[in-house]
């Protein structure tokens, strides 16, 4: 039989051990008051243990406004909050009796924004009553930023920051299938910088790159619906996918983009159209059917672009993609 002295020694040893763990850790009692805030947690948050012990103010170390931490959610049984409070999380039951989650924390005291991986585990007595909840933290900021950078490289054009051709192809396929299911219109713009080869020959490729970046930036001021996608299609050619948009709507957006680029007043002394950089655009729209493909929409937009160029450039023309009889 363990003596009271032995039990007291074991408890003190456990507390001391947790205090010196290299993993940032804090412990809440059954009333969600902080009973342990270890030294690693002090270093991570910049908040000394004396400020939080015996309180429910532990959230202040991680967030600017009151909200539950993972240990609170576990103690309260409020797992319905996981979806709204965390970027990623385990489902209840996946980690035995505990929870795992990941989120960005503003860390007000150290004035850093960190991406933390969090584990919360309960401690019960012999009768199954909750005694405490242990929360451990890992700073995964560097790994998360590296992951985000790799994702950005995979989906964005390195020069303009717009979506790249791969992203364009994948999105068009997905939006096309959605439009078939919903029998909703989808529109596509193909946009070409007028006389860009002459621009490069006159001003050099470095200026040419700068020109493309400025054109892309002007485009994004006119493509602002979350559902729309502006992409670099290739070279000096750009594309915009617009779900739930008919031809009239697509032509209006295309003309706004054309005007925004013209208003940049980028000199183009070699242009055979005007004295500044301009765009030509082709718009195509369809309520797609099963016997049509995204390639048909691209071909229609490309044909409209061709007509715009041969009609004098610095203009927008469009076409409806009609279902086969």
Image (tube, helix red, strand yellow):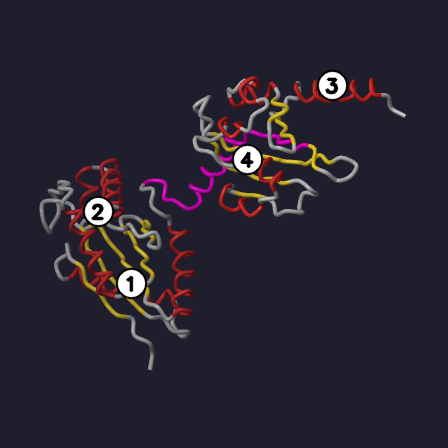
Residue for badge 1: 245
Give the residue number, with chain letter if any, for mark 2.
197
Residue that mark 4 sits on: 69
Earlier sequence position, callout 1 versus callout 3: 3
Proximity of marks 4 and 3: CB atoms separated by less than 8 Å: no
Alpha carbon separation for disc pair 1 and 2:
32 Å
- Relative placement, left or right, of 9 versus 297 is right
Residue 227 position (above or below residue 51): below
Instruction: Report x, y in % for residue 71.
Output: 60, 35
Tally of marks: 4
Rounded to the nearest angstrom, the CA distance separating label 3 from label 2 is: 77 Å
Q: Judge the density around disc 1: few (<14), some (14-19), many (≥20) Cα neighbours within 10 Å.
A: some
Q: Residue furthest bottom?
A: 325
- Circle 2 residues within 10 Å: few <14, some 14–19, many ≥20: some
Nearest the eye: 111 or 65: 65
In the rendered image, the vertical position of residue 101 relative to residue 51, given as above or below: below
Q: Which is more N-terminal, label 3 or label 4?
A: 3
Query: Can you tell which of label 1 and label 2 is closer to the viewer?
Result: 1
What's the distance in space between the residues labelled 4 and 2, CA to CA?
57 Å
Label 1 residue SS = loop
What range is drawn magenta here? 132-159
């Amino acid at each position: 039989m363990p003596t009271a002295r032995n039990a007291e020694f074991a408890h003190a040893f456990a507390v001391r051990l947790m205090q010196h763990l290299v993993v940032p850790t804090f412990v809440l009692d059954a009333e969600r008051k902080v009973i342990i805030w270890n030294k690693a947690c002090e270093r991570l948050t910049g908040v000394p243990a004396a400020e939080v012990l015996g309180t429910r103010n532990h959230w202040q170390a991680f967030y600017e406004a009151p909200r539950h931490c993972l240990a609170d959610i576990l103690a309260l049984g409020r797992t319905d909050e996981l979806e709204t409070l965390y970027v990623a999380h385990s489902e209840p039951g996946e980690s035995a009796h505990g929870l795992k989650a990941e989120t960005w924390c503003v860390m007000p005291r150290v004035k850093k924004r960190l991406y933390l991986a969090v584990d919360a585990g309960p401690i019960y007595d012999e009768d199954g009553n909750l005694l405490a909840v242990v929360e451990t933290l890992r700073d995964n900021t560097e790994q998360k930023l590296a992951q985000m950078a790799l994702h950005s490289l995979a989906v964005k054009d390195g020069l303009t920051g717009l979506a790249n051709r791969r992203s364009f192809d994948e999105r068009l396929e997905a939006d096309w299938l959605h439009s078939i299911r919903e029998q909703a219109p989808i529109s596509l713009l193909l946009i070409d910088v007028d006389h860009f080869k002459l621009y490069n020959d006159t001003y050099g490729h470095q200026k040419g790159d700068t020109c493309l970046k400025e054109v892309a930036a002007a485009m994004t001021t006119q493509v602002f619906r979350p559902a729309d996608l502006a992409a670099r299609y290739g070279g000096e050619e750009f594309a915009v996918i617009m779900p739930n948009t008919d031809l009239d709507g697509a032509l209006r957006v295309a003309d706004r983009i054309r005007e925004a680029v013209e208003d940049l007043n980028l000199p183009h002394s070699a242009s055979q159209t005007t004295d500044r950089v301009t765009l030509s655009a082709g718009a195509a729209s369809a309520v797609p059917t099963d016997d049509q493909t995204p390639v048909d929409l691209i071909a229609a937009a490309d044909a409209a672009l061709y007509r715009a160029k041969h009609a004098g450039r610095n203009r927008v023309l469009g076409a409806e993609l009609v279902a086969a009889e």
